[in-house]
């Protein structure tokens, strides 16, 4: 797996990787990360294609999932 690049964001680490015929789009915030795998296609064949996917709307959805992850993390931690 090799890193193709990082998409700038003030709070998140957003990276695109290539592994065989798959791309991996990874978002990191604090102790949490989300990874999405995509097969290489004519429409998704380069790092530049992923720059167009990462929109403000997608970022809002990613934050919503991170909020859910944090809620679960707090619940799990409180039981330890």
Image (cartoon, helix red, strand yellow):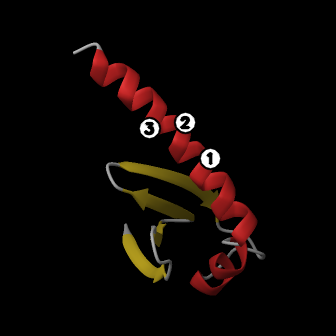
Quadrant of res 52: bottom right
Instruction: Identify the image quadrant of the N terminus.
Output: bottom left
Q: CA distance from mark 1 to mark 3?
A: 10 Å
Q: Residues within 10 Å of mark 3 (few under 14, many from 20)?
A: some
> Nearer the N terminus, badge 1 or badge 3?
1
Mark 1 and mark 2 in contact? Answer it, CB < 8 Å: yes
Residue 74: quarter of image: top left
Q: Secondary structure at mark 2?
A: helix
- The residue identified by callout 1 is 64
Above or below, 66 relative to 41: above
Q: Is residue 54 left or right of residue 26?
A: right
Tell me residue 55's x, y (percent): 71, 72
**Rendered residue at 44%/38% (across/down):** 70
- Residue 11 vs 58, above or below: the answer is below
Q: What residue does disc 3 label?
A: 70
Categorize mark 1 by other alpha carbons within 10 Å: few (<14), some (14-19), many (20+).
Answer: few
Residue appearing at x 63%, y 86% in the figure: 48
In percent of width and height, residue 3 lies at 39, 76
Question: Where is mark 2, residue-wise?
Answer: 68
> Is residue 45 found left or right of 32 in the rendered image?
right
């Amino acid at each position: 797996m090799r890193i193709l690049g990082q998409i700038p964001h003030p709070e998140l680490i957003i990276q695109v990787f290539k592994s065989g015929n798959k791309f991996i789009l990874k978002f990191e915030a604090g102790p949490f990360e989300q990874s999405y795998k995509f097969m290489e296609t004519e429409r998704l064949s380069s790092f530049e294609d992923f720059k167009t996917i990462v929109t403000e709307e997608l970022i809002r959805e990613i934050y919503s999932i991170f909020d859910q992850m944090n809620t679960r993390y707090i619940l799990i931690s409180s039981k330890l």
